[in-house]
Image (tube, rainbow, N blue to C red):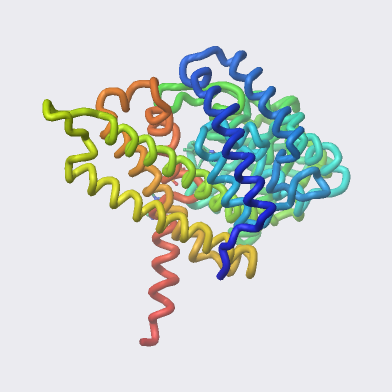
């Protein structure tokens, strides 16, 4: 195992760190209290500079204008840009587009790629991924109820989805729907590309989450597909191949989230330490940092963040060396370990900031609201623990 950072990547990371401090962190004020249009202008300006620096969409394939980074290098990149909620968007690697780009790249036909993949990588359009349904358990997608029925040269899609994140303003959705109801459970569903201007694609609302409905990229749409007709040529991959594609999408997607969360954990931790060193809490001039309880918080978090980081880099290295399938255990483990470490870092930093921590004068409360979902999406903690636990116990079955 070798996590030595190449010279080229070291230079890129230094450029990214400087750019984040200079151009991205100052935009957070607009995100927290400002005007969405001013924010959008600021983000577009920063994106243009990222393109000029040659750092746009670094995880995407070179032939589509990315840098084709390895998983380990992408991990280091995502950690650096994850320090701000705006980082991924400014660098062109935000979810759900990043995952859609990966599956289009792997399964898309040349026609699909020309129409959808290229403009998506270039940041000219946005997309969404429409799998979860309010009425069926997302943790077990064999229960999916949305159907896509063949009618001549078309599929006709009917069903209700929600948490189709970023549907608001997206050019197309990749929808998972049942095409082969009589097939074995994991061969029943397919992925289908649905332009959002297709009649029958009804974005009925942006779901209010933690008090905010959001808009545009920062929203979670409820979509009703009502006799929504698209050509059969919009099928992604093979009919009945939806579960295989979902697995291909969610595997790397999970690791991308973990890498970004490391950036959040690191920044929240630094904020906590800074606050503890500066806040005077007694007449003798002593600081929060002089109290043993805070020293224990600092020690525990420092150790946990280091551990989480090494686990993520190891999982990324496994994927680079042996593929995502071999790294199944490592990916399951980091999904719940890093989500919980990141949430603990944010919560502890809020505690150390006192009342200031729950205001929107710092970024901490934003993360508290937005990142709680980390323990739910892309596989809830309990689901990953169950599947990892089963495999671990099986390995010891003959002892
Ligand atoms: C912020 C956010 C963004 C999202 N973005 C998208 C998106 O873009 N596209 C999309 O399709 N979906 C998206 N989702 C949906 C997400 O993938 C689902 O919420 C997730 O799969 C869980 O499904 P569910 O909500 O139906 O919960 P359920 O499946 O009903 O599970 C509820 C809870 O039950 C427990 N549980 C479930 N199964 C088991 C088990 N086997 N053993 C023990 N406990 C269990 C877990 O604690 C789980 O949290 C998003 C969700 C959130 C919160």
Q: Quadrant of residue 363?
A: top left
Q: Assign the N terminus to one quadrant of the image.
A: bottom right
Q: Residue furthest left?
A: 283
Q: Is residue 180 visible?
A: no
Q: Residue furthest front?
A: 284
Q: Residue at x 83, y 43 (%)?
A: 112
Q: Is residue 147 visible?
A: yes
Q: Position of residue 105 (x, y in %)?
A: 76, 50
Is residue 332 depicted above or below 171 in this figure?
Answer: below
The residue nearer to you, when weighing 12 against 327, is: 12
Is residue 52 depicted above or below 34 in this figure?
Answer: below
Q: Quadrant of residue 40?
A: top right
Q: Position of residue 240 (x, y in %)?
A: 70, 55
Q: Is 361 situated left or right of 67 in this image?
A: left
Q: Position of residue 272 (x, y in %)?
A: 33, 37
Q: Residue at x 71, y 44 (%)?
A: 101
Q: Is 301 situated left or right of 57 in this image?
A: left
Q: Assign the C terminus to one quadrant of the image.
A: bottom left
């Amino acid at each position: 195992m070798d996590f030595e950072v190449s010279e080229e990547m070291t230079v890129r990371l230094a450029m990214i760190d400087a750019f984040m401090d200079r151009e991205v962190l100052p935009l957070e004020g607009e995100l927290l209290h400002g005007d969405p249009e001013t924010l959008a202008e600021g983000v577009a300006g920063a994106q243009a500079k990222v393109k000029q620096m040659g750092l746009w969409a670094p995880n995407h394939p070179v032939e589509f204008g990315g840098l084709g980074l390895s998983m380990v290098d992408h991990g280091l990149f995502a950690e650096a840009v994850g320090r701000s909620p705006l980082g991924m968007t400014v660098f062109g690697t935000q979810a759900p587009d990043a995952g859609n780009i990966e599956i289009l790249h792997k399964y898309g036909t040349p026609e699909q790629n020309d129409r959808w993949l290229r403009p998506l990588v270039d940041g000219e359009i946005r997309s969404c991924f429409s799998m979860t349904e309010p009425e069926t358990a997302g943790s077990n997608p064999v229960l999916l109820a949305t159907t896509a029925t063949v009618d001549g040269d078309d599929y006709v899609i009917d069903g209700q989805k929600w948490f189709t994140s970023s549907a608001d303003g997206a050019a197309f959705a990749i929808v998972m729907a049942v095409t082969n109801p009589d097939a074995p459970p994991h061969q029943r569903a397919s992925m289908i590309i649905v332009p959002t201007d297709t009649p029958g694609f009804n974005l009925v609302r942006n779901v209010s989450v933690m008090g905010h409905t959001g808009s545009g990229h920062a929203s979670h749409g409820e979509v009703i597909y009502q006799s929504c007709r698209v050509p059969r040529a919009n099928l992604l991959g093979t009919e009945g191949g939806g579960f295989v594609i979902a697995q291909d999408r969610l595997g790397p997607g999970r690791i991308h989230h973990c890498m970004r969360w490391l950036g959040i954990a690191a920044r929240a931790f630094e904020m906590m330490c800074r606050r503890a060193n500066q806040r005077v809490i007694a007449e003798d001039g002593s600081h929060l940092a002089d109290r043993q309880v805070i020293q224990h918080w600092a020690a525990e978090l420092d150790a946990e963040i280091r551990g989480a980081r090494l686990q993520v880099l190891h999982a990324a290295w496994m994927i680079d060396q042996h593929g995502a399938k071999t790294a199944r255990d490592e990916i399951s483990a980091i999904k719940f370990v890093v989500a919980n470490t990141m949430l603990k870092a944010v919560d502890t930093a809020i505690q150390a900031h006192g009342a200031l921590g729950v205001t929107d004068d710092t970024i901490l409360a934003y993360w508290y609201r937005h990142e709680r979902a980390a323990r739910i999406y892309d596989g809830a903690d309990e689901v990953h623990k169950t599947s990892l636990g089963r495999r671990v116990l099986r390995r010891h079955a003959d002892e």
